[in-house]
């Protein structure tokens, strides 16, 4: 259990001031379920015997672990007249370990009123309430003042421990996890080709081997209810060339092409959305070239679409151009 800063600071006080900073850590025992913890019986007899003065307890509830969800903590009381309370504390989601709250006991209570149990709503997702919370009784004015001075110190202490833990893979989270190994220049995950998605019309990895059947496989055809739009190779196309995800096709001449049988599946309706995507490394040639096309001629007035690369008369090679037409009008 993490010790409050008020308790740690009290250990450095001289004897005359120590009596005002006395404290008692209460023991939480597992209850009947994960949401419940029982407070072990306690009293302040040692405080009275040591200092000859009744205790004036103020109870502090503290988080031992981070609070992932908004949680209400109800603490039950028992006094000379029987059970009372409970006293409730609301802890916001995202509150860090080390944060502590003073329990506002009803007016008129004394050291004879003790805490009996703790109930959290909702129950902890892992572990038990006894493992996630702590209760401490501050028994003098100096201890209460030290709590007011040290409450933020508790939070900073846990933030520091959490920050230092980010150096280890098993403890790192979020952006820290992404940065581990970045200085080595090695990606955490190897690049992988796109996988199947029910909205994809056709998916070509172009990693087919020479002589494969079909020559160019549409990966969507491997899934139930789908018919693949497989392609054929024409002209100087070299399968097995180095690519982004292993093997790729290399198109070594103007007649090199992969042809897929025409299908309405490739049409883009007048009010439809579409994504046309590929990974390509063009040669540094000044000529314009086709990448993906619904018809072979980018200047054609036939209905269809085309994605190409070149300078297109701009004098800057490597431009991308997408053109779509309905047979009468073409928009670039």
Image (spheres, grey):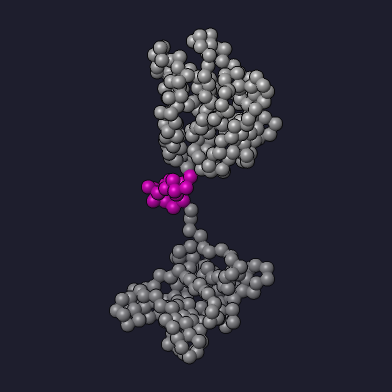
Q: Position of residue 264 (x, y in %)?
A: 59, 82
Position in image of residue 23 (x %, y %)? 50, 19
| Quadrant location, the C terminus | bottom left
The quadrant in which residue 232 appears is: bottom right
Front position in the image: 231 or 11:
11
Q: Residue furthest left?
A: 315
For residue 29, side relative to residue 292 (left or right): right
Image point (59%, 38%), residue name: 72
Residue placed furthest toward the front: 108
Q: Nearer the viewer, residue 122 or 187?
A: 122
Q: In the image, is residue 177 part of the stretch drawn in magenta?
A: yes
Q: In the image, is 11 to the left or to the right of 203?
A: left
Q: Position of residue 191 (x, y in %)?
A: 48, 58
Residues shaded magenta: 173-188
Q: Is residue 85 visible?
A: yes
**Residue beneath the point at 53% across and 14% down:** 54
Image spot of residue 65 (x, y percent): 53, 35
Q: Does residue 15 appear to the left or right of 106 in the view shown?
A: left
Residue 30, quarter of the rendered image: top right
Q: Is residue 236 above or below residue 116?
A: below
Is residue 9 depicted above or below 187 in this figure? Answer: above
Visible residue check, residue 157? no
The vertical placement of 101 against 194, above or below, is above
Give the residue drawn at x 51%, y 63%: 193
The number of numbered badges drawn on the structure is 0
Q: Residue at x 41, y 12 (%)?
A: 15
């Amino acid at each position: 259990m993490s010790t409050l800063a008020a308790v740690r600071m009290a250990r450095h006080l001289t004897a005359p001031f120590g009596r005002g900073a006395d404290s008692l850590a209460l023991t939480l025992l597992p209850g009947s379920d994960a949401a419940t913890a029982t407070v072990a019986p306690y009293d302040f007899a040692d405080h009275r015997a040591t200092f000859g003065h009744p205790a004036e307890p103020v109870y502090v509830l503290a988080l031992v672990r981070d609070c992932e969800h908004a949680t209400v903590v109800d603490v039950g009381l028992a006094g000379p007249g029987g059970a009372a309370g409970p006293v409730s504390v609301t802890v916001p989601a995202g509150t860090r370990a080390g944060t502590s709250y003073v329990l506002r006991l009803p007016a008129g209570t004394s050291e004879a009123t003790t805490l009996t149990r703790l109930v959290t709503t909702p129950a902890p997702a892992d572990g038990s309430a006894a493992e996630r919370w702590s209760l401490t009784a501050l028994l003098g004015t100096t201890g209460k003042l030290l709590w007011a001075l040290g409450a933020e110190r508790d939070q900073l202490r846990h933030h520091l421990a959490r920050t230092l833990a980010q150096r280890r893979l098993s403890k790192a989270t979020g952006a820290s996890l992404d940065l581990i190994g970045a200085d080595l220049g090695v990606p955490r995950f190897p690049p992988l080709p796109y996988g199947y998605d029910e909205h994809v019309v056709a998916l070509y990895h172009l990693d087919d081997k020479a002589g494969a059947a079909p020559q160019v496989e549409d990966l969507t055809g491997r899934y139930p209810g789908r018919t693949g739009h497989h392609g054929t190779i024409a002209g100087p196309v070299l399968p097995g060339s180095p690519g982004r995800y292993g093997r790729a096709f290399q198109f070594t001449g103007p007649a090199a092409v992969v042809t897929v049988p025409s299908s309405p599946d490739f049409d883009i309706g007048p009010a439809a959305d579409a994504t046309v995507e590929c990974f390509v490394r063009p040669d540094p040639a000044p000529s314009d070239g086709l990448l993906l096309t619904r018809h072979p001629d980018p200047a054609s007035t036939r209905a269809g679409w085309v994605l190409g690369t070149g300078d297109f008369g701009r004098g800057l090679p490597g431009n991308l151009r997408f053109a779509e037409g309905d047979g009468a009008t073409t928009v670039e």
